[in-house]
Image: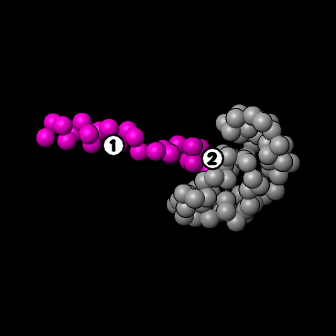
Amino acid sequence: MLSKFYLFSLSKPIKFNDLSSIVIESGLSDQIDLDALYEEFCEMKPALELAYSSNLPILDKWNSIFKENNFKYILKIVQFVFSLFGFNANAERVFSMCSALW
């Protein structure tokens, strides 16, 4: 599942199949209606096309998309993805501190 998160960099077009599989695999399917998600995805395509060609940073691209539109299901997915840590440096630091105390 983690390999699909590259979609949210908006460097390549997002496919609905990848988006829906993230919802299912991450356990968000009880909060997100896939039919409504598909409708939002179709409405969002013009905004995505602009974002793909933009040179803005990733978060600015997403902010511009959500500032103009109300895509509540896609917003939930994006918030979920960006809330995940991309690295484990903090956890490693804690374990190092604990092992020093032991």
Mark 2 residue type: Val
Asked whether 12 or 83 is in front, the reply is 12
Residue in the image at 74% along x and 56% along y = 14
Q: Look at the image and tell me whether residue 29 can be seen.
A: no
User: Residue 70 versus residue 61: which sits nearer the camera?
Assistant: 61
Q: For the magenta stretch, what is the residue range?
A: 76-102
In this image, 27 relative to 77: left or right? left
**Image quarter for residue 15?**
bottom right
Q: Nearer the viewer, residue 83 or 7?
A: 7
| Residue 44 screen position, x and y as percent | 80, 50
Q: Quadrant of residue 51?
A: top right
For label 1, the SS is helix
Decide whether residue 33 is among the magenta residues. Answer: no
Magenta stretch: includes residue 87: yes
Q: Which mark is residue 92?
A: 1
Q: Quadrant of residue 91?
A: top left
Q: Position of residue 16 (x, y in %)?
A: 73, 62
Residue lying at 40% horizontally and 40% vertically, measured from the top left = 89
Horizontally, is 12 left or right of 96 in the view? Answer: right
- Where's residue 2, x and y in %? 54, 57
Q: Tell me the quarter of the image containing the C terminus.
A: top left
Type of amino acid under label 1:
Glu
> How many C-alpha atoms fall within 10 Å of the one at disc 1: few (<14), some, or many (≥20)?
few
Which of the numbered marks, if any, corresponds to residue 78?
2
